[in-house]
Image (cartoon, rainbow, N blue to C red):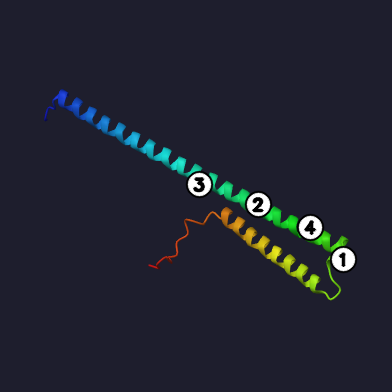
Amino acid sequence: MIEQDPQQTLTEALVRAELAEAELRRMRQTLASEIAASDRKAAQKMSMLRIIFSGIAALMCFLGVLTLVNWYIPGTIDRDGIGASYFQMAKDIILVMTGILGSAMSNVFDGRGASRSTDKPEDA
């Protein structure tokens, strides 16, 4: 049986402990940076949602104003119907823009957004 020097065994154990502590510090630092990155990403998402929501709210207010003007002020639409077609076009544009903003909002909530790859998986 081979006898080991206790001093050498203790030194090797201390070196392994220092390496383990260094690895633990590195892992903690990596975890902290990942958490900070995800917090920044969540904050960016929330600011994007605020902008999109305020855009949708503004478009719906414009649509309401156009509708009220059309209903309650009869002189705004001229007799030959040109004003009515402009009103209809403006209403259609606002509705399309609302749909685009709604689609943008659903893309913000889509969890697959950045992790989706364009490569198709290969069959084995």
Residue closer to the observer: 79 or 58: 79
The amino acid marked with disc number 2 is Phe
Residue 33 in the image, given as x and y percentages of width and height: 42, 40
Q: What is the CA distance from the residue labelled 2 to the residue labelled 3?
A: 18 Å
Q: Which of 111 and 39 is in front in this view?
A: 39
Left or right of 41 in this view: 90: right
Callout 4–callout 2 Cβ contact below 8 Å: no
Q: Which residue is drawn at 88% across and 65% down?
A: 74
Q: Which amino acid does label 4 sit on?
A: Val
Q: Which residue is drawn at 26% across and 30% down?
A: 18
Q: For the residue labelled by badge 2, is the local secondary structure a helix, a strand or a loop?
A: helix
Residue with the mark numbered 3: 41
Lower sequence index among marks 2 and 1: 2
Q: How crowded is mark 4: few (under 14 residues within 10 Å), some or many (20 or more)?
A: few
Residue at mark 4 to residue at mark 2: CA–CA distance: 18 Å
Q: Give, as a three-letter code, the residue at label 1.
A: Gly
Image vertical order of residue 110 relative to residue 123, above or below: above
- Label of residue 65 in the image: 4
Location of the C terminus by quadrant is: bottom left
Q: Along the polypeptide, which appears first: circle 3 or circle 4?
A: 3
